[in-house]
Image (cartoon, rainbow, N blue to C red):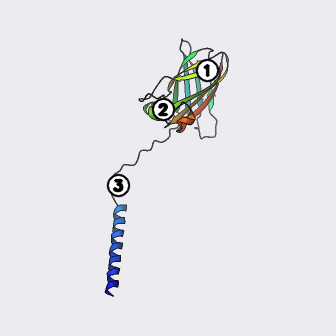
Amino acid sequence: MIKRNTILKNIKKVSLIAFSSIALISCSDDDDAPEEQNEEEVITTVIVKLTPEAGGTAVTLMSKDDDGADGPNAPVITVENLAANTIYNGTITLLNETESPAEDITLEVAEEDDDHQFFYAVSGAISNTEYTDMDEDGNPVGITFTLSTTDAGAATLGVTLRHEPKKPNDGTLTDAGGATDVEQTFSVTVE
């Protein structure tokens, strides 16, 4: 009987210690601040401004999607013709026009340039694009770039912004990975 009482007392003590430990752990003061979430920005408008390097009138390509990428309405796309055999200095601007005044998302991309990269895909009478801006580690960002046209004809310019791509990468979306913040293709005429 004494042995049984000792065993029961030991079981009670162990149970009480275990219960107290669980209670203390679950009620501990957690001073760690919650990890900051970088919510995805709403991008309603993509503006590509192309200025001829040799001088002349700038060309604007714009995609405006008032209900956002997830909305049911397709974006409204406006383009102007490009000149043949011309090198353009390009800049891209991203806006959230659901805000008033419109929020310039390009500023956030520039501030977080090590976590962002624009990718440009060309076809037809656009021969290539080249980055002219880099992040602090010397990796391309793509807010500014050059674009070269060839002889007259049809062309496309695809613009994709990736969040947290692998850097450096081989210049392809596949190698870069990351999440797509915005993606738009412009069909243009080179004359």
Question: Residue visible at 55% across and 35% down?
Answer: 175
* Quadrant holding the N terminus: bottom left
Q: Residues within 10 Å of mark 3 (few under 14, many from 20)?
A: few
**Secondary structure type for disc 3:** loop
Give the x, y percent position of residue 186.
62, 27
Q: Which residue type does callout 2 highlight?
A: Pro
Give the x, y percent position of residue 167.
48, 34
Q: Is residue 119 above or below residue 147?
A: below
The image quarter containing residue 25 is: bottom left
Give the x, y percent position of residue 39.
48, 42
Q: Which residue type does callout 3 highlight?
A: Asp
Q: Residues within 10 Å of mark 2 (few under 14, many from 20)?
A: few
**Secondary structure type for disc 2:** loop
Give the x, y percent position of residue 89.
53, 19
The image quarter containing residue 70 is: top right
**Secondary structure type for disc 1:** strand
Disc on the earlier residue, 2 or 3: 3
* Quadrant holding the C terminus: top right
Asked whether disc 2 touches disc 3, contact meaning CB atoms under 8 Å apart, the reply is no
The image quarter containing residue 20 is: bottom left
Query: How far, Cα to Cα, is label 2 from label 3?
Result: 37 Å
The residue tagged 2 is: 168
Q: Which residue type does callout 1 highlight?
A: Ser
Disc on the earlier residue, 1 or 3: 3
The residue tagged 1 is: 127
Asked whether disc 1 touches disc 2, contact meaning CB atoms under 8 Å apart, the reply is no
The residue tagged 3 is: 30
Q: Is residue 23 left or right of residue 75?
A: left
